[in-house]
Image: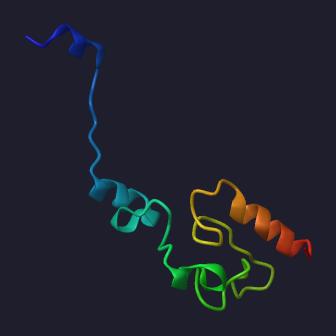
């Protein structure tokens, strides 16, 4: 018989890192911040050389996400900075 405390749970679902990576493309090798934070992935090099300042190479299309400067874990940092670029600031 199960201990009384276990009766509180109706079910259990375990997700492995492999499962998470399959469901979320940004979690490559467990990376929740969408890419490297090494020097070659910062400032004008993020997300790729020639694509900094939120430009994509398609006229009028800009990109913001954890993959753009200032990177993941910054709240709405990339959106705020992209808006400043688009506003001419």
Residue 54's quadrant in the figure?
bottom right
| Rendered view: 63 above or below 59 | above
Residue 2 percent coordinates (x, y): 12, 13
| Furthest residue in direction right, as rendered | 88
Image point 53% across, 85% down: which residue? 40
Residue 83's quadrant in the figure?
bottom right
| Rendered view: 86 above or below 40 | above
Is residue 3 found left or right of 81 in the rendered image? left
Image quarter (top left, top right, bottom left or bottom right) of the N terminus: top left
| Furthest residue in direction top, as rendered | 4
| Furthest residue in direction front, as rendered | 39
Image point 47% across, 74% down: which residue? 36
Image point 28% across, 58% down: which residue? 18
40 and 51: which is toward the camera: 40
| Rendered view: 74 above or below 63 | above
Residue 75 percent coordinates (x, y): 66, 53
Is residue 87 found left or right of 38 in the rendered image? right
Residue 52 percent coordinates (x, y): 68, 83
Image point 81% across, 79% down: which residue? 60
Q: How is the image coloured?
A: rainbow
């Amino acid at each position: 018989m199960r201990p009384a405390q276990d009766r509180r749970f109706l079910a259990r679902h375990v997700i492995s890192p492999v499962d998470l990576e399959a469901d979320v493309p940004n979690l490559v090798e467990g990376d929740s911040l969408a890419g490297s934070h090494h020097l070659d992935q910062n400032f004008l090099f993020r997300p790729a050389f020639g694509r900094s300042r939120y430009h994509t190479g398609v006229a009028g299309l800009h990109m913001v996400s954890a993959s753009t400067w200032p990177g993941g874990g910054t709240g709405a940092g990339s959106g705020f900075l992209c808006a400043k670029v688009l506003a001419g600031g």
